[in-house]
Structure formats: structure tokens, C-alpha cells
Amino acid sequence: TDIISAYFFLSFLGRSAVEMESTESTSEGARGETKDISQDISQDIIRAGEEGEGEGKGEKVSKGGGKKSASLAKAKAAKRKILERRRERERVKAAAEATAATDSTKDTAGHTSSAPINATSPSSSLCDTSAAAAVTTSTDGEGVAGAAGGDNNEKKSKKSKKSKKQRLLPGQVPDDILKDPLLNEAIAAVLPPNYDFEVFKCVHRIRSLSASLVALQMPEGLAVYATALTSIFRRFTRADVLLLADVTYGACCVDDFTAKALGADLLIHYGHSCLVPVTDTSIATLYVFVSIVFDVQHLVETLCHNLSPATKLSIMGTIQFTGSFSELMAQLDARGYSVQCPQCRPLSKGEVLGCTSPVLDKDAIDALVYVGDGRFHLESILISNPGIRAYRYDPYSKVFSKESYDTEKMHAVRRGAVVAAQKAKKVGLILGTLGRQGSPDVLRHIEHLLAARNTPYIIVLLSEIFPAKLDLMSDVDCWVQIACPRLSIDWGAAFSSPLLNAYEAEVAFSGGQSWRDIYPMDYYSKGAGPWGVYTARDHSGR
């Protein structure tokens, strides 16, 4: 009777321990392992009871309290043996995992992040390796008994777990996220397969930061997927999500200030590269380029049909399509074409912005092939490389077209605005507040130029600049906008007063900068003139 009582008592304890492990399991496989453990514990209880009964034979048991004491001792002995067996199985499992981890490191090491990561800012490693620590579960199998051996195995188990943490490289996403069947199913159900929103990396980043509130920001072209991403992050992390739905023209519009003011722990900016350094953002920021896979083979065949192999090509485009440039260049090279992919630092190879693009070596290039929809970014290359033979391939419509830009007319219009601005008696300085568009360092540089000329000025903060808004301040003779340089080039003629950008203000008010024959598109370039964001920042001593 005592043995049976101990059996049911320990069965209850065994089931409770199993249920606790079951609540920690996150997959059907883990729950299956817990079920097997439950069966093993029941068998262990029976074996322990039999061993305890055998040990009790031949002993004299006193009546009353002595009998109860002996029964309790048997129950405790049975419990100890069960726990020892379970611990030994855990040690065996941990040792097996350590061996498997050595083999799998080469496979998992390739899953590195394309964007920088940092605990306070994503420029350096933010990867919280504790998120990838192995969860040890009990499995079938007998271990070697012995207290000394058990201690050694336990030390090996701890070393195994520690080594796993160290093997997870900065930016590497753990397998428990990459191979989560529910997460993969959710991504496949709501997001297009040729758009890489890097959901795994985002989930890992949110979990690593233990973020409670995440802000998402994206251009209007990607806003259709905003609610789907919100649902995924809410389901697979413990964070709530908010959308920053103000217009986002480019990476210069990254709005970490608003995200921080709203209490967000992390800002995820989609669709643009790391134009504003993550070391400069006020909260942890993650850039997701959203690489888009397009029909590279069709573009190769199109180029071969229209351009001879003797044509020296330069390939450029927006950040979404640059991920396929390596494959594109390899295929063209195999067909005898000479292809290069220019870079304007700090941008990625082949990347071009509406305000920043490289000056190409025309002796080494016969034609430019731009991959992207629309002309805004392409015009930046055409402005900084007048007269170059240029083509545009639209990956969506698969249309291949020849492009041009009237740089002579643009120069005439903008030089006229500079001449008119030099006669201004009062200047208005506009600092753009749409995300990070406005540079305080560039603003201070223009202030110094005006102060040296003793020209009165006022400072106005605007998120978006419209003619009707500026017309309300009719006493201002000239405006200098420190937001988007292309605003002055493309729409300056729509304003009643001259609207200059930083480069044009340098020509108008410095007294030492003459008008350039090649209009500079280097606003965010590391080698820009004094009107550039990084140049002005370096001069300010920051």
C-alpha cells in the first residue's frame, strides 16, 4: 500500500514537472518530447518503487509511526533516483547539442545582417546572443551514474551553452526564428515573395532589445504592406507597433525624433539605405532596404539585343535593385561585356540618390544603364554627368528606354536665381523638419556667410515647402532651403522669390565660390563641397 501511495504521489510530481516544461515549449516537436518524458517518468517511478520494495524486504518495521517513516524514506529514495535519471538525460542531451553545434556553425554563419546593428544604435553589433541560447529538453536515453561524472557533464553542458552564445555572430539571426514554421507561414501569406522585408532580422532585433514599442516608417510605395508587418511583429514579439505615416521621400526623412517622442524603443525604416548614420539617430534604428528581385535574365537579353559587347557599361539604380547587380554583371561579363558599378560613398555600390550621385569617367564608360522606376534618381546622374548616353530599365514594366536631360536650360534658370538672390536685402533660411532632411550644420554655415555680408535673415522651420506658405512673408526677398537640393532645381521656378539650395547659396553669398560647369550632386557625399552635409558637420567640429 505504501509503495502504491508513493507511486501516485510521485506520478503527480512528475506530471507537474512535465506540465511546467510543456508551457515553455513553443513547437509541436517540443510538446512531443515532453509527452515521451512523461511516459519515462512513470516507468522510472515503477522501477524505483520496485527497487525500494526490494530494499525494504527483510527489514523489521515497527508499528504506527515507524511504518510511515519507512514508507516516506522509500518515497524519497525513489524520487532521488528519478531526478538523477532525468538530470543525466539532460546532460547527455546537452553534450549531443554541443557536438551538433560545431557542425552547424558553418551553416548558420552565413545568415549575417546587411544592416549595421547596435544596442544603442545599429552601427555596431546589437545581437543579443542570449536570445540564441539553447533550450535543453529531456530526452530518452540512459546516462552514466556517479556524482563526479555528473559534475563534469554539468560543466560541459554549461560550456556548451556558453559556446553557443559566442558562436552567434553579430547580426546573425538564430535558427529558432529562421526556422519558425508559423513565422514563415505568416510571411508567405501576407508579403510578396520577391520583396525582402527582412522580417526575421526585424523580429530578432525587437526581441534582442526587449522592445515594448516599435515604430515603422516607409515610403508610400511600400505602405500597402504596413499593416501586414504590424500584425506579424505583434504576433511574434511582445512589442506593440505604431506607424509613422507622414510622407517619406527618402532616407533623409528618417524620423527618429518623432519615434523617440512617442516612446518607441526601436525605429525600423524601410526602403532606403543608411544615409543618416545610425550613430547619429536618437534611438536604436534599423534600416531595411527591401531588396526586390527582378527578372535579371530579361534585362541581360534586352541589353544584348540593343547594345553590342564593345559597349562599356556602367550599371546603377536605386537601393532596392542593387542586390541583383552582382548576378547581372556576371552574366554580362560572360557574354563579353565590360561592366562596372560605380560608388559614391557613403552610398552602396551602384546606388544613386536624387541629390547624390558619382561623376563617371566618360573615357571608361560608353553608356549608363539605370535600373529603377521613375526618373527622379536617374536625373541626379544626368545632372552630374551631362551628355552621357543613358538608358533606363523599368523592372516592373520591363520597358527599356533612352533618357536625356536638358542641363543647359537647368543651368540658365538656376544661375538666374542666384544672380537675383545676390540683390536680396532680407533672406529667409528654411530648415527642413521632415525627418532628418534639414542639417543644422549646413544652416550654421549659411548663417556665417550672411553674417559676413551683414545681410539680415530669419530662420523658418518647415516640414514641407510650398509657394503659398512663403508668399505670406512677403518682406523676404530670397529664400535658402536646407532640406532637399532638388526642390530648388525642379520646382524653384514656381516660387515668387528665388529659392536657393545650399550649393547655390554658397555661390551667391560666399564671394569665393564660382558657378560650376558641372552642377554638383554631392549633398551626402563624403567628398562634397562646403554645402554638403558631412563637410559642414566636419567643419563644425562634431
Image: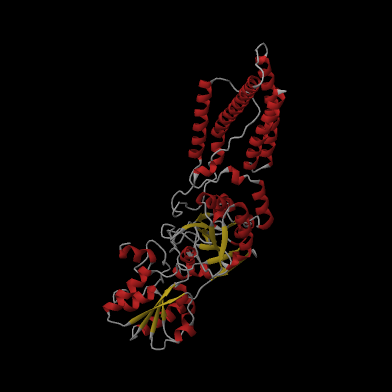
Counting from the top left corner in percent of width and height, residue 99 is at: 56, 30
| Residue 117, placed above or below residue 438 | above
- Res. 541 in view: yes
- Image position of 468 (left or right of 7): left
Q: The C terminus lies in which quarter of the figure? A: bottom left
- Image position of 145 (left or right of 530): right
Counting from the top left corner in percent of width and height, residue 53 is at: 68, 17
User: Of 503 and 33, which appears nearest the observer?
Assistant: 33
User: Of 532 and 237, which appears nearest the observer?
Assistant: 237
Task: Identify which residue is drawn at 50% across, 70% down.
Answer: 379
| Residue 109, placed above or below residue 11 | below
Counting from the top left corner in percent of width and height, residue 322 is at: 54, 57
User: Of 59 and 536, which appears nearest the observer?
Assistant: 59
| Residue 319, placed above or below residue 74 | below
| Residue 396, placed above or below residue 29 | below
- Which image quadrant for residue 432? bottom left
Counting from the top left corner in percent of width and height, residue 370 is at: 54, 63
- Res. 494 in view: no
